[in-house]
Amino acid sequence: MNKTILVCGTYDTKDDELGYLAQVIRGQGGAVLTMDVSVLGDPAQPVDVSKHDVAKAGGSSIRAAIASGNENHAMQIMAKGAATKALELHRAGRIDGVIVLGGSMGTDLALDLCAALPVGVPKYIVSTVAFSPLLPPERIAADVQMILWAGGLYGLNSICKAALSQAAGAVLGAARAVEPPRRMRPLIGMTSFGKTVLRYMVTLKPALEQRGYEVAVFHATGMGGRAFESLASEGAFAAVFDFAPQEVSNHLFGGLSAGSDRMTNAGRVGIPQLVAPGCYDLVDIVGWQEVPKALKGRPLQAHNRLLTSAVLNADERRQVAKALCDKLSTAKGPVAMLLPTGGCNEWDRPGADLHDPQGLDAFFQAVRKNCPENVTLHELDAHINDAAFCAGALEIFDTWVAEGVITKGA
């Protein structure tokens, strides 16, 4: 149960707060390793990883950071160094989790540090800008936890102690309880939405598990796609079933983006991809906010009070088709694109509210026109939620396994 937590922050300005975090962790029976990412000042007490160590790991020095006269440049040096040192400490078995404390500057650094650590290492950011639109999705690690640092901009008080003590207990508890990924079987990454709109995972997940694979299904509503891309970039998947690339549409038209690199990381590292255009025709927007001007005057599908989907017109669907094809054209591994000619979500079936055969045909024609040479098209006479669609996907998958394109299941 003895776990060591890396406590990181600017000890020149937040010494009391960081010391309080360490005190609570030690009081609960944990151990602490401290890292200072200050630039101008010095900590009141010695730390385990000094700011000079951090700057050196960032390929520079504190003197050079100060001489730059630019706090943004200086903190980027420290961010690079902090990420490098944290990963080094983890690989050496010296830390079991990390907690970083900061305002906007410290949070900027914390995002890099946490992104450097693998999934399964508890990573907590206590931030004055937690959950804020300042945080770009592409910089958020797949399993990072954030806690709002209420009342903590400067100095200790009873309000911020409540947040800090919970954070200290959370990271230590996580380090004691975490079950890191074992990867006993090859991992399949799959994107989807809930069963009201996309249902293939209900069939595909058990079918793939019977073949000896582990299957992780990601909710493609922005942050789920970000986690999917983060793991894909690490080469975590034996193959992907990216059947809900709607976040590409979102990014194009101002919806809930998963970042500009959505649908590129699996291809960049050569992971075999099975792709289908689930919900390509929808743009997810925040349900409690006013509809963006560019999306007004069109059908809307209110999923709940948080999430509403705006329906794209034919021209916009052609833009989505080209964007998908452009992204897949850079893939270094095999790509199969499945086109279910009967429709791409439950709401666009004949007789359903969003049925639009002309829009669907415009999308398919644009895919055929823009499909790159490295992508094989498979047109299926089925709806994406039909059993025939799953059968078609599994047939391609099984062929790739037989040919050695995909690692055989355990």
Image (cartoon, rainbow, N blue to C red):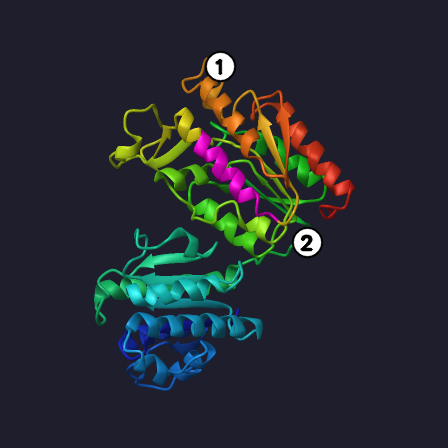
**In the figure, 143 relative to 201: above or below?**
below
Of 179 and 305, the residue lying toward us: 305
> How many numbered marks have been drawn onto this rendered protein structure?
2
- Residue 350 tag number: 1
* Residue 154 is a magenta residue: no
Residue 171 visible in the snapshot: no
Compared across the picture, whether 59 is left or right of 155 comes to right
Residue 245 lies, in percent from the top left, at 49, 38
Towards the viewer: 31 or 58: 58
Front-lying residue, 375 or 230: 375
Q: Nearer the viewer, residue 100 or 329?
A: 329
Query: Which segment did they paint magenta?
Result: 318-331
Q: Do the numbered discs 1 and 2 sit on residues whose CB atoms are within 8 Å? A: no
Mark 1 and mark 2: Cα distance apart in space: 43 Å
Check disc 2 and give the amino acid type.
Met
- Residue 332 appears in the figure: yes
